[in-house]
Amino acid sequence: MLENGAWDDIITLPLGARSRKPRTKGLTMIIDKGLGYEETKDLLEVASDYIDFLKLGFGTAAFYSKELLKKKINLVKEYNVEIYPGGTFLEVAFFQGRAACFLDRAKELGFNFVEISDGTINLNPNERKKLIEMALDRGLKVLTEVGKKDNKTKVSMVNLNEQVQKDLESGAFKVIMEGRESGKDIGLYDEKGKLIENKYEQFTNKVNVEDIIWEAPLKNQQFDFIVKMNSDVNLGNIASNEILALEALRTGLRGDTLNLVTSYESIKEQEMHPVLRKLVAAWSLR
């Protein structure tokens, strides 16, 4: 909640205050599929405190004029939010043999981050490592993504787990777990968008969950991750009009997570992150 907020002296947040920016956990990445300049400004004026990354989804960055793109990048950065082009755009550049030029242009335009992925193309381990190094050499920070966009392409959770470790060792800031903008029948989710527990357990077997940004566009997914990892879990592919709704969910100002507090006795048996359980218990005893 913002300092000097209109309600700060009236209520306290049921699940406690969130970590403030700049932060390395509890990150929120939104997907921008074509917000205009004024729409972006309106969004940032309302919600910039709750947004860490704005991703220009897929290859949408290609359809801005150079002048408008630079203007939008500068605007977003003025609000202390990082902006970056979607990983598919760099995949196209790599496929066309233009990755180095792409990274040079990203730096020139004012991006501080890029996303490196192989959701559609295939990168061998050396190519992936080289792309990370190329970006870092240009002073760009790197988010990588693991997982395929086609659900027919089967990749084991163990292999994705290993790729996370390699990316982080190569210098990636965080690794995104693929979930697409639909959140259904992809990655860790079944065709209805429900988290597949055995896949989740296999994937998280050896990773530090704070190193992962979980693409979770659906409310039930966001709720599940909050329960499993606490309010400061990293979440991505959030719709731009859902930022405040997510923040309400994170802090107990939405029925789903407020219910954890008000119905504490009935949810003791649920799998819940120890920090979240402690917060819920403290509030339930008041």
Image: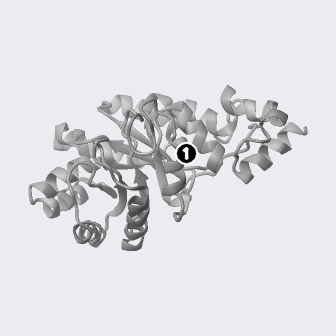
Q: Which quadrant, please, contains the N terminus?
A: top right
Q: Position of residue 199 (x, y in %)?
A: 49, 49
Q: Position of residue 160 (x, y in %)?
A: 39, 59
Task: State left or right for residue 101 relative to residue 156.
Answer: left
Q: Position of residue 223 (x, y in %)?
A: 60, 37
Packing grade of label 1 (10 A; few <14, some 14-19, many >=20) is few
> In the picture, residue 39 is in which quadrant?
top left
Position of 6 relative to 88 (above/below):
above
The residue that appears at 83% across and 40% down in the rendered structure is 283
- Front one among 272 and 21: 272
> In the picture, residue 190 is in which quadrant?
top left
- Front one among 233 and 187: 187
Does residue 231 appear in this view? no
Task: State left or right for residue 241 relative to residue 37.
Answer: right
- Mark 1 — residue? 197
| SS under mark 1 | helix
- Front one among 151 and 74: 151
Does residue 93 appear in this view? yes
Name the kind of residue labelled 1 in the image.
Glu
The residue that appears at 83% across and 43% down in the rendered structure is 281
The residue that appears at 36% across and 72% down in the rendered structure is 170
